[in-house]
Amino acid sequence: MWHEVPIVGLGSLIRVEALDIVDVLVSKLKRFNAKDRSDIDAMIHRITHESLRDRFAAALDRFCFDARQDDLPSYIANLNQVERDMFGVAESQFELPDWVDDGS
């Protein structure tokens, strides 16, 4: 989700939009390198676990039908690590369609 960022004093000359924090965090679950984990840790206090889980689930539904489907098990593992280590909650469980390789 995009949010318009008001720019004081410029009127309608410029329009700036920013990606919602929850969407930024979901996007960082793909690469999930040290910088991504640090970014997530710095922003996580601004969202709820439920908002991240629900947005991830919505993205997961779309990713099942495109080229990202083979990466879904690692996305889920990365989300689960965030849930455990940063939120201190139980891992969410997601069912993947039969055609998605679950890595086993």
Image (cartoon, rainbow, N blue to C red):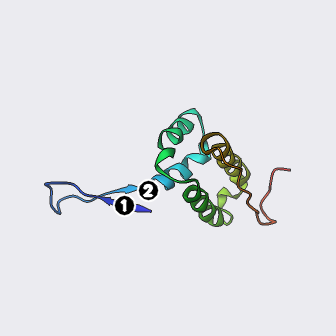
Q: Is residue 23 left or right of residue 94?
A: left
Question: In which image quadrant can residue 87 be found?
Answer: top right
x and y, in percent, of residue 68 in the image: 65, 56
Residue 90: image location, x then y, percent: 71, 50
Q: For residue 3, which numbered disc appears in the image?
A: 1
Q: Residues within 10 Å of mark 1 (few under 14, many from 20)?
A: few
Which image quarter is the N terminus in? Answer: bottom left
Q: Residue at x 55, y 59 (%)?
A: 51
Amino acid carrying mark 2 in the image = Asp
The answer to which of marks 2 and 1 sits earlier in the sequence is: 1
Label 1 element class = strand
The residue that label 2 is drawn on is 20
The picture places residue 52, in percent across and down from the top left corner, at: 57, 55
Q: Residue 95 location in percent, x, y?
A: 76, 63
Marks 2,1: beta carbons within 8 A = yes
Q: Which residue is farthest front?
A: 88
Up the image or down, 97 lies above or below 16; here it is below
Q: Residue at x 60, y 41 (%)?
A: 86
Tell me which amino acid carries mark 1: His
Number of dots carrying numbers:
2
The numbered mark at residue 85 is none
Residue at position x 17%, y 54% from top? 8
Q: Is residue 56 left or right of residue 6?
A: right
Q: Nearer the viewer, residue 41 or 5?
A: 41
